[in-house]
Image (cartoon, rainbow, N blue to C red):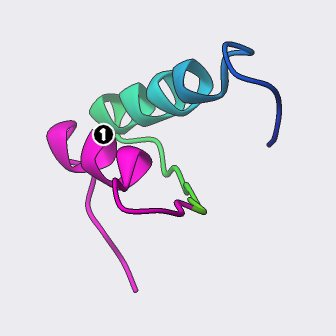
Amino acid sequence: MGGFLGSGKTTAIQQACLLLQKEVRVGVITNDQGVQLVDRAFLQNMEVPRVR
């Protein structure tokens, strides 16, 4: 998924991750770049398991 700032990308990821509470399998691939890995920190705060 891609898009401009404010287009809802992070909200879509958040909503998908909420499905984990209902034991629905969800996969999220992030492509963070730069010094601050915003998506990775966001997913860690939501306690989304990380698979490598």
User: Percent x, y for residue 40?
Assistant: 35, 55
Specify the segment rendered in magenta: 32-52
Is residue 25 left or right of 1 when viewed as pictured? left
In the rendered view, tell whether residue 51 sits above or below residue 48.
Answer: below
Q: Quadrant of residue 20?
A: top left
Residue at point 38%, 26% (across, down): 18
* Of residues 2 and 16, the one drawn nearer to the viewer in this rendering: 2
Number of numbered discs overlaid on the protein picture: 1
User: Percent x, y for residue 27?
Assistant: 55, 57
User: Percent x, y for residue 29?
Assistant: 59, 62
Residue at point 21%, 50% (across, down): 44
Q: Quadrant of residue 49?
A: bottom left
Q: Quadrant of the N terminus?
A: top right
Does 19 appear in magenta? Answer: no
Secondary structure mostly seen in magenta is loop
Residue to which mark 1 is pinned: 42
Identify residue type, mark 1. Phe
